[in-house]
Image (cartoon, grey):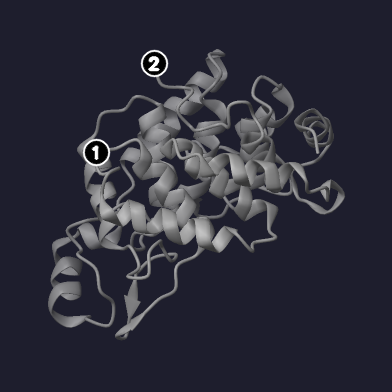
Amino acid sequence: MKRSAILEDLSHRTPGGIEDAAIAGLALRGVGKVDETLLRAQSSAGAWAAVPNGPPNTYLTALSLLALRHSREPQEFRACARSLQWLQGCYPVECHWLWKWKFRLVDRQVRFDPSKYGWPWVPGTVSWVAPTALTIVALRTSEIESSRIQIAEEMLLDRACPAGGWNAGNSSVFGVNLDPHPDFTAMALLALAGGPHVQSPIISSAAEYLSMRLETCQSAYSLAWGSLAFAALGDARATKYRRRLERMDARGTWPPRTLGLVALALEDPTFAFKEFAK
């Protein structure tokens, strides 16, 4: 399956939502159609929501920022500036002293350090892996220097599953260790690949889990995230999953988000979310 054919298919698709539009826009960098979809959907505060008039969504805002970040057009530049401001002002509830006291002394069903926090899916909730990981990537590629990036990286390390990799949020609930998930693991590795913890045993363990999990994975979406993560780490295993994707051909059944991720994974070299940094 050639990347050019995927991009041609993707350019004629109508996004089914903001995630579709953002990932497709990132794959189709320079094509205005998808960018316009994102620009129209941005709130006045700078965020994007999963549904019209819905609560602002951190994960979708970070993805949209990444999609628009390539452009220097005035309208898109202003959209990026507003989204950056919103992301930097969005905090999870565990930042509040009362919630820190609650999680440390009262609510012990989940295991995590509330002093290490990232970003919630929506305001008024706790930190989760996917929005934290994508926001780190978005801030770093936007060349933002913020102490929150370091704290968020520490949050990801704190939430890693004992088996290696990451679940959606916590690593343990009610004394039971949760299983990692390949997509969330790949996102976390993308975020940590550009930071000071890249040599951590937690990263190595997560990469081994992800590699093992992808060996039998038939999901193009997961294989693409995995390939992007290994490329960001400079790990040769990115090539293995890239070749797996090249042998797959189910474009008619894939949503735009999957087409976009596969197109990014099939770039030469594989897109590593570092291309925007100077």
Where residue 266 appears, x then y in whole percent?
67, 34
Assess disc 2: are there few (<14), some (14-19) or many (≥20) residues with their C-alpha within 10 Å of its C-alpha: few
Q: Nearer the viewer, residue 169 or 120?
A: 169
Left or right position of 272 against 244:
left
- Dot 1: what SS? loop
| Residue 21 visible (yes or no) | no
Q: Quadrant of the C terminus?
A: top left
**182 vs 261: above or below:** below
Residue identifier under label 2: 278
Give the percent coordinates (x, y) of residue 89. 31, 42
- In screen coordinates, is 214 left or right of 245? left
Q: Position of residue 14 (x, y in %)?
A: 80, 41
Q: Secondary structure at mark 2?
A: loop
Dot 1 corresponds to which residue?
196
Q: At 74% across and 41% down in the image, what residue appears?
A: 246
The dot on residue 185 is: none
